[in-house]
Image: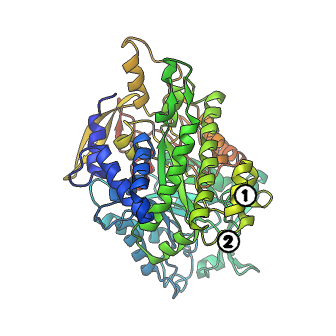
Amino acid sequence: MLDQQRICAHVMADRYAAPGEATASQIYARVAHALAKAEAPERRTLIAQEFLRNMEMGAIGAGRIMANAGTSAHATMINCFVQPVGVGSPTLPFDSGLEQACTTLAMGGGVGYDFSALPPSSASAEAKAATPAVCSAIDRYDAACRSLSFQGSRRGAQMAVLSCNHPDILDFIRAKHGRNRWRTFNISVAITDAFLVAVQQDDAWPLVHPALPDERSISMGALKLSNGLWQYRREPARSLWATMAEEATHSSEPGFLYIDTINRANNLRAIETLRATNPCGEQPLPEYGCCVLGPINLTRLVNHSFGIGGEPEIDMEKLGKMVRTQVRMLDDVIELTRWPLPAQAKEAFSKRRIGVGITGLADMLAMLQLHYASEAGRLAARSVACCIRDNAYAASAELAAERAPFPLYRADDYLAAGAIGDFLPPDVVKAIKAHGLRNSHLVSFAPTGSVSLAFADGCSSGIEPAFDWVYRRQIQLPGAIAVDMTVENHAWRLWKQSHASDLPLPGYFQKSADIAPEDHLAMLAALQPYVDASISKTIPVPGDYRPERAQALFIQAWKMGLKGVTIFRPDRRLAAVINPSFRARPSARITQGCGTCG
């Protein structure tokens, strides 16, 4: 048994413990008892015990669940949302959209938005009368979020997405360059297949919008197209692509969302269009969409760690059982949570999206004596992801038999040729045919930085490799005081406990910076086929990484069928929140500490 690290105790107390709680077991008991209230009265005690056992084994809820279930806090248990921005229409004026965003953020949800409907800065005064242009609108959303009051050290987190054909795309992707702008936002570009084909063919790329251009733009050649859009101008696709890659290399933003891939892979592609994601990118969602998340700590599933006492192995049977309980618990969250907006509740109840996730993947691989950057490591990771997907869908079919399918369930969305049913085991397909599914989506690999500290002894977060084995991290204490605390990696601690102190670490202990960008990408590609939502992961690149290499990496990610990718290049000019011998924070993006996904 490992002693609790000071930083783990602090994060648990600061972010997740209710008054009177001092241990993880007390938090688990509160959460289990609260969520079991969604069950039939005669089964609540039994189900609460099942939820509690599952959490004790390592299957927990994401941050908002652990903090808010069973408390009187005016907060939601949902981690991630996507909402429309007001576009000046009578249905949703701009100020109303901003007000809705603040309502969701204030209750603890992170929010993503597609700003593509907003007019360009070069639109006519009439077009901008009811709503500001894109970058000005994001300024207002950012300022509004920063003005909100949040509990503890958690802060609001937002994602701004803009289509690659919006006339303001260059201003958008350059907005953070060397500036302390949009501090509550990550930004991503929605990249289409057509744009990447234009890049490969060295074509001109039209930047279009329905808003009427101003007189200067018209005098410079803006023209009305037959589909009702205005073509403001044409840019060389390769030049635009190069600028995107340069900014991503310089500032770690924008991220890239392969939006056509996202929509093709969506279980509900016939009835919804996805244009944005939550702040960390693991959840592409429709307007007012949301998702309930819950990771499973994979380090708890390794038998004979490091080969001690036998051949190391993953307990797949145990994992499958944990996944099935996790699906039930997350489905219960939908019944019990507080909803910031009625439209979110309506959307959630019609589709019942949940996201079973993981944490500690890299630690698990080290405990199995496997390199993260190896085919054997990727095969082990795939086997875990496949087990999670198959058992999650099986559990959802069982819940559908008990509680009915989600209201918008249609068999063809899951069982027609090319749908997900083609990839599931025959017994799971049979269950879906018989009962349908309780949940439209079931798997999502989110970042888990805070819950991995609070409840998993500082294991590697999500699917990321360990940042370092021992490092110092900046933690915000009550009263806005920041202190540095030591973090020790969980797998490293286990290995040190069972080996001589002077024995060097084996080569299968791989830190994030020691892994080639292409191997980080390969792990994403290994897992994505089993994840019906998406995956939050940053690709670390060396300090001398060139934008030309970034362009090649982004094209490779698209060709591999990934839904999104973000790179991080260390830059000492960025504020550091992680300090080994200190390196700049692990991403200029806010995904590591936004508090919305974990």
Q: Which residue is drawn at 72% across and 66% down?
A: 411
On the picture, is 403 further left or further right than 423? Answer: left
The N terminus lies in quadrant: top left
Q: Disc 1 to disc 2, how far (Cα)?
A: 21 Å
| Residue 183 in view | no
Q: Position of residue 324 (x, y in %)?
A: 55, 50
Marks 1 and 2: CB-CB under 8 Å?
no
Residue receiving disc 1: 193
Q: Is residue 233 above or below residue 516?
A: below
* Residue type beneath disc 2: Ile
Q: Is mark 2 on a helix, strand or loop?
A: loop
* Residue type beneath disc 1: Asp
Residue receiving disc 2: 271
Query: In terms of depth relative to the viewer, which is nearer, 334 or 277?
Result: 334
Q: Please state which of the two labelled residues, at mark 1 or mark 2, is closer to the viewer.
A: 2
On the picture, is 386 further left or further right than 465? Answer: right
Mark 1 or 2, nearer chain start: 1
| Residue 223 in view | yes
Query: In terms of depth relative to the viewer, which is nearer, 530 or 578?
Result: 530
In terms of image quadrants, where is residue 196?
A: bottom right
Query: In terms of depth relative to the viewer, which is nearer, 205 or 490?
Result: 490
Q: Where is residue 243 in the image (x, y as percent from the top left)?
A: 60, 52
